[in-house]
Amino acid sequence: MILTKQYRCIHSSSCQCTKGHLSEDVIFLVFHHLNWNPKLIATLSCVCKWFDDLAKRVLWKEFCRTRAPKMMLDLQSSGSHSVDGSWRALGKLLIYCSGCSKGGLFDSIHIPSHFVYRTRFSRTSGKSFLLPQCRTDVLYVSDPCEHLDQGEEGDVGFFRGVFKSFAMSKVRKMLIKRNAQFHPSEVCPYCKAKLWSMLQAKMIPQSASCRLGAYEDCIEYYVCLNGHMLGICTLLPLSDSEEVASESE
């Protein structure tokens, strides 16, 4: 196989790519063969600004399209070729549980963040996290990432999600209308944008706890300026959650 001519990196005078690097087309083919491995994409991004730019523009986008093709088509169906908060942030949201720490966003217990192999995101489930007057918005929400037997906190679940065209959403307009305040110190773990508390804004419907199988008074979630959502809940024991699910039906 004849490799494409190498090019010297010109993005930074301190760049270590003194011998140049392969063209975008060759790198694209390599990562296609690797099935857009997210850990390798993240590693490549650390090499230099040129690789980081390529990963942001191309590689993370292809990873997202491969991992959740129907969801990505829907998020882009408004005609945009990009998504709110960058493809890298969305790629991280698909595979990364943010956990929590004492004194952090969810000031309750320390549970380390971690990567997850695969998570199901549902547009139908997303409706349960919206007030009735906001249910024309499109929100994809994951199944809860369960962390069982967390002492006094019981069984803890973390969930995450993303809005379609959040800048035009009814949720954003309502948050602004209610003069919701940003969290004073914490930012979105996916895109570093400021966060609104849906609990503080009194915008968490009862249907959210039913959907998660969680205690109604033990659920909290935030939405960032780019429409990424992250939340925590205390899960009901399995038998109780099954009863709640049957009642909601």
Image: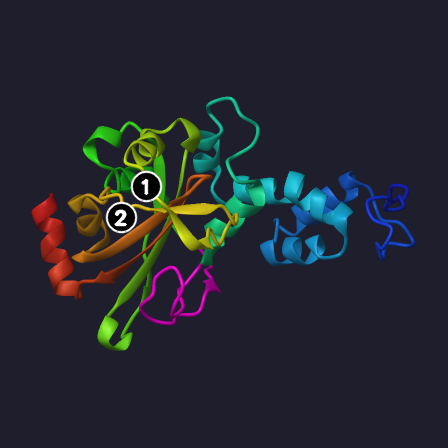
State the CA–CA distance, disc 1 to disc 2: 7 Å
The residue located at (33%, 30%) in the rendering is 173
**Quarter of the picture holding the C terminus:** top left
- Marks 1,2: beta carbons within 8 A: yes
Under mark 1, the amino acid is: Ala
Q: Is residue 175 magenta?
A: no
Q: Nearer the viewer, residue 160 or 131?
A: 131
Q: Nearer the viewer, residue 121 or 234?
A: 234
Residues in magenta?
98-118
Is 174 placed above or below 195 here?
above
| Residue found farthest to the bottom | 151
Which secondary structure is most common in the magenta stretch? loop
Residue 96 place in picture, x, y as percent = 47, 57
Q: Secondary structure at mark 1?
A: loop
The quadrant where residue 40 appears: bottom right
User: Quick one: label 1 or label 2, which is nearer the N terminus?
Assistant: 1
Is 146 placed above or below 64 here?
below
Under mark 2, the amino acid is: Gln
Q: Secondary structure at mark 2?
A: loop
In the rendered image, which residue does mark 1 sit on?
A: 180
In the rendered image, which residue does mark 2 sit on?
A: 200
Name the side, left or right, on which 50 lies relative to 71: right
